[in-house]
Amino acid sequence: MNYRKCTHVYKQSNLYALNLDTYLPENPVKNLPVVIYIHGGALIFGSRKDVNENELNAILGEKIAYISIDYRLAPETKLMDIKSDVEDAIRWVREEGSKLYGFDANRVAVLGKSAGGYLSLLSGTFQNKPNAIISFYGYGDILGDWYSRPSSYYTQSPHVSQEEAAKCVTSDILTQADYPERWPLYLHARQTGSWASLVSGYEPHTVYTKLTPYCPILNIDAEYPPTFLLHGAADTDVPVEQSKDMYSALINMNVKAQIYIQPNGDHVFDRFWENKSEEFGCILSFLKKIFIL
């Protein structure tokens, strides 16, 4: 599909600049609804360029604008500031994006995958919330043992020492990072159960209350946006229970929610999806219902 792509700086200081890419469908009209994409990468690697073309084309085909954002990465930047980046990206879309492109500020959805799914779920707790959330294999609980104890799956991989992991950390603020270069850092964190403290700066088992504001599942209220959760039943990275528990918590608070579990699906199970797959159809139906298309 042909589309128009533009890059903008949505947040900057003298130490960093954060970019987002806007993708507009052919012959865009005023008051376009928007999907903001938040990439995954355990909060420590990834880029706004990590876009699934099939997904992009399917969403643009429904006359919905697509925006992919960068955010500062951990551990050089901690979770509290990463959260503020996502808040500022949503604000930019509603304010500057509406001025530049005529976006409908009342029809903004957030779609994220893995750590991006987590940030998407966290956005439901913001004061400036999106109007809808789509979370692929995300997680609502960063205090659980799955996140803050050694992973039985990753401890089967060759051991990564503290020294090896430390070599992946820089003194700079990173807004993009390659998966191969940062993988040892992630693997060490999962093998030692130090992921939560790595990205937040807090040890969850000693300062529990410091991290409760960053657990979406503990902060659901009646204003939480309609949410669609997707997860693989055999996910070896983020347990499928993370989406199941989040779904139950949303339903208990009378929040509109849907869940799709991919049978035998592992992490990133959607990478081979095609535009016209049943799963894409469910996502598009969800968006069209929320956006009244």
Image (cartoon, grey):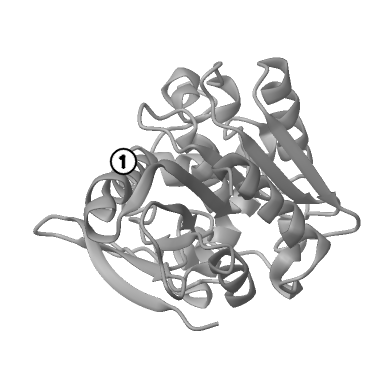
Q: Is mark 1 on a helix, strand or loop?
A: helix
From the viewer's perspective, tell me whether residue 123 is left or right of residue 62.
left
Does any portion of residue 171 appear in the rendered image?
Answer: no
Residue 197 placement (x, y as % from top left):
47, 40
From the viewer's perspective, tell me whether residue 215 is left or right of residue 30.
right
**Residue closer to the observer: 44 or 8:** 8
For residue 100, which quarter of the picture? bottom left
For residue 207, which quarter of the picture? top left
Residue 46 placement (x, y as % from top left):
47, 67
**Residue closer to the observer: 83 or 66:** 66
Q: Which residue lies furthest to the left in this view?
A: 14
> What residue is shown at x 36% (from left), y 76% (from top)?
5
**Residue closer to the observer: 78 or 153:** 78
For residue 16, which quarter of the picture? bottom left
> What residue is shown at x 55% (from left), y 44% (from top)?
291
Q: Residue furthest right?
A: 263
Which residue matches tag 1?
84
Residue 278 placement (x, y as % from top left):
82, 61
Q: Which residue lies furthest to the bottom in this view?
A: 2
> What residue is shown at x 65% (from left), y 31% (from top)?
144
Whether residue 58 is situated above or below residue 229 in the rendered picture = below
Amino acid type at circle 1 is Ser
From the viewer's perspective, tell me whether residue 39 is left or right of residue 226.
left
Q: Disc count in the image?
A: 1
Q: Residues within 10 Å of mark 1 (few under 14, many from 20)?
A: some
> What residue is shown at x 72% (from left), y 39% (from top)?
243
Does any portion of residue 231 appear in the rendered image?
Answer: yes
Residue 222 placement (x, y as % from top left):
56, 16
Quadrant placement of the N terminus? bottom right
From the viewer's perspective, tell me whether residue 209 is left or right of residue 269.
left
